[in-house]
Image (cartoon, rainbow, N blue to C red):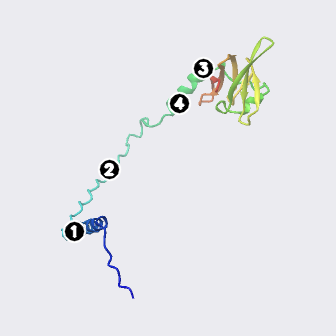
Amino acid sequence: MKPRAAYKLSPILMAVLISLTTLFAGCSRELRDLEDYAEEVKSREPLGIDPIPEVKPYKSYKYQVSNQRNPFDASIFEAKIVQKIRKSNSGISPDSNRTPEFLENYPLDALRMVGTLEQRGGLWALIQTPEKTIQRISSGNYVGQNNGKVLAVSDARITLEEIIPDGFGGWRKRDGSIALSE
């Protein structure tokens, strides 16, 4: 039998082992400091919670003047406003005898102007519907769900005038446009 050879550690391996031992010894000390701090915090007397503030009761007020007008009744003003608006907009109303055009089935914000076409001296606007079909329109056509009549077509936009309800049973005009989208 051959005698066992003694293992000899290299100086680099020895330095690594010493530094690891020192490092782990330092970690265990820091952990002990943390445990001591946690115990100190647990042993402290808990602080109380402030009580909920007292809610003051609501005091209602009853309107006792029954022979005078209710200050919250707006019906007096509504009647005057409706009469004034009807007088000022008496000539405005959509043409109920006109046959609706195809592009009146869509709201204005659903339609896109994608270009123009010049044909026989007239300028036509090319409108794309939500279904991606292209329709052409020019001055005098109607577009949108609010009786929008096309007033002018240019290379950059369509100018139109809509007739919309005023909220009081009458109608009013509103300017609108569809710009060329890129």
- Which of the marked residues, 3 or 1, is nearer the chain's N terminus? 1
Nearer to us: label 4 or label 1: 1
Q: CA distance from mark 4 to mark 2?
A: 32 Å
Amino acid type, callout 4: Glu
Label 3 neighbourhood size at 10 Å, few (<14), some (14-19), many (20+)?
Answer: few
Label disc, if present, on residue 87 of the rendered structure: 3
* For the residues bearing labels 4 and 1, Cβ distance under 8 angstroms: no
- Picture layout, residue 86 above or below residue 132: above
Residue where numbered disc 2 is placed: 59
**For residue 178, side relative to residue 20 (left or right):** right
Task: Kindly state the secondary structure of the residue where label 1 is placed.
Answer: helix
- Picture layout, residue 24 above or below residue 89: below
- Which of the marked residues, 2 or 1, is nearer the chain's N terminus? 1
Q: CA distance from mark 4 to mark 1?
A: 82 Å
Residue where numbered disc 1 is placed: 29
Label disc, if present, on residue 91 of the rendered structure: none
**For residue 48, side relative to residue 120 (left or right):** left
Task: Return the x and y of residue 34 as percentages of the image width and height.
Answer: 23, 66
Task: Kindly state the secondary structure of the residue where label 4 is placed.
Answer: helix
Image quadrant where residue 174 sits: top right
Amino acid type, callout 1: Arg
How many discs appear?
A: 4
- Which of the marked residues, 4 or 2, is nearer the chain's N terminus? 2
Nearer to us: label 2 or label 1: 1
Identified at 50% across, 31% down, the residue is: 76
For this rendering, which residue is in front, 147 or 130? Answer: 130
Q: CA distance from mark 3 to mark 1?
A: 92 Å
**For residue 131, side relative to residue 180 (left or right):** right
- Which of the marked residues, 3 or 2, is nearer the chain's N terminus? 2
Amino acid type, callout 3: Lys
